[in-house]
Image (spheres, coloured by chain):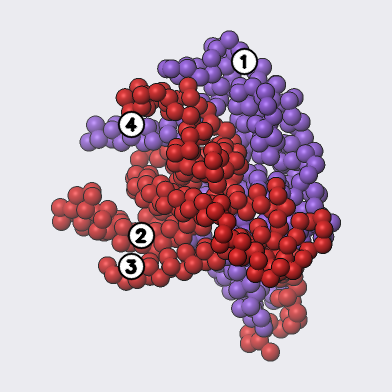
Chain colours: A purple, B red
Amino acid sequence: MRLRRAGMYILLSAIGLVFVGPFLILLSAGLKPAGQAVFSFPPDIIPRPPVLTWVIEAWTAIPFPAYLLNSVIYVGVTVPLYMLVSALCAYPLARMNFRGKNLIFFAILSTMFLPGEVMLIPRFLVVSQLGMADTYAGVILPGVLSAFGIFLLRQTFAGVPREVVDAARTDGCHELRIFWHVMLPAARPTLAILGIFGFISVWNSFIWPLVVLKDSAKYPVALGIAYLAGITGTDVRSLAAGTIISIIPVVVIFMIMQRHVLEGMRGAVKG
Amino acid sequence: MAAGRIPGQRWYTPYLFAIPALALFGVFFAWPAFTAIQLSFLEYDVVSPPVYVGLENFTKILGDGRFWTALGNSLLFLVGMFPLLVVVPLLLAVLVNQKLPGIRTFRMLYYLPVVTSMVAVGVAWEYVFHQQGVLNWMLTGAGLLDKPIQYLLDPFWALPALVLVEGWKSMGFYMMLYLAGLQTIPTNLYEAAKVDGAGAWHRLRRITVPLMVPYIAVAVTVEMLDAMQAFTSIYVMTKGGPQDATLTLGYYIWSAAFEHYEMGYASAMGLVLWVLMIALAILNYRLTRGRAVMP
């Protein structure tokens, strides 16, 4: 039995290496001194000694701090807006009866069948017509509405006990207060799920910013890395170092919030 | 009007709550969707005014060899990613569904590529695929290759290499999807099967897979839609080359629109892709519903 368990851990670790290995190779390349070959048979993974030369070079070869700040802005504005807009729309869908409710529901549902790739061109033209091409707003606003968030919150709001809402109502709360002081606190775990998924998707978003932005000063960090990779003569070590920097924030957030990921998947399949 | 309305709540209250979402829906979904249909009947290069060309864009598709290459490659993506995203993740999910100390850490490790950007993943795999990289070292060392291959520059290997990268990146997502499903299966089912002497393979086939059919259906649908839209890995790693070997529909549409400014033609191809995706989703829905009632 103990042997079986040891074997299981070896198997789990071997699979783990498959998923982490490419990142380790990147990390190793980014920390190797100039004298040590990046590629060799057999692979020479341990940097001797680890140096920060390439981290610094990547940091200065492209305006790295500006790109990181841009990504922080995109995430910091999109994700709260996304949570708020989703919650506002989910509340009446979950708790009120009104004419056109099904119509709104199906409109939101239909967005799941309009894939981003197909919408790329017309959405770019619409955003241009609105004068939002090459602006922060143009990057942010099309990403705020998501059926996933609305459906998940609708489910959560529907599960809030009636007595709690009635009690608030007899205390004279109007709908907005109930929404803010009863519904949103009750939905905190769901909002955490939306937060982590929103963070990951906005931080990594690539194709839409690529299409909307002309001015490289507004690039998020993912575009910055593609830009760095496209500059001829970029050292393989500094590209590796830059790429590692770009993924650290999202990996850290994921590690802190990881338990919400499985809950999110559970909700997504049910909803 | 509506039954069950709360006293004090105005008739327009629900609509006020929904306004921000509806406004965004109108501007960024409904309007562009309408524009897409309109554009596909136009010739438009962004600079000069659009010209109505009727069905010309669609007839052009029929005679465009690159479109058919791209469609073929997209279907290869779909087929190639199927084992990686529908089958393997189910086995991974069974593996990480065990009650072992530290199992959460392994789940997290397997999920790591999902949270990193496709750009970063593409860069990382360029190091793996390098002529002197770790993959060539392993394959030549094991005697499977005579000499190292430049996977991304080889017309035969470039597409399988990208399929591998895309599959590797998303595997954790599908694993979590399945894990969510596995945790709804009552453990006493397995215990009863064990008492009856069913082995691990038998339990997987007779209990896990049948009960997981709804989740497998979701996985298949998501996999097909994802595969049909593959773009970023191609943009970062091959730009559709070598010799269009990795030109997918997603990449071809993007390139027609934003490199050649053929907005009308690109939109027409986009509509074809959209119809294909809807058709695949419906087909899958039909197939799995038939499958779900069988066991």
Mark 3: secondary structure: helix
The disc labelled 1 sits on which kind of residue? Val
Q: Nearer the viewer, residue A212 or B240?
A: B240
Q: Are marks 2 and 4 on the same chain?
A: no
Amino acid type, mark 4 = Ile
Distance in Å between CA atoms under marks 2 and 1: 49 Å
**Badges 4 and 3: C-beta atoms under 8 Å apart?**
no
Q: Nearer the viewer, residue B38 or A247?
A: B38
Residue, disc 2: B212
> Compared with residue B263, is residue B126 higher up or lower down, i.e. above or below?
above
Measured in 3D between alpha carbons, the distance from the residue under mark 3 to the one under mark 1, in whole angstroms, is 57 Å
- Tell me if A61 is positioned left or right of B289 in this view: right
Numbered mark located on residue A10 in the image: 4
Give, as a three-letter code, the residue at label 3: Arg
Point out residue A97 in the picture as x, y percentages from the top left corner. Answer: 64, 81
Outermost left residue: B197
| Residue situated in front as seen by the camera: A199 or B25 | B25
Label 3 in the same subunit as label 1:
no
Which numbered mark, 4 or 3, is in the foreground of this view?
3
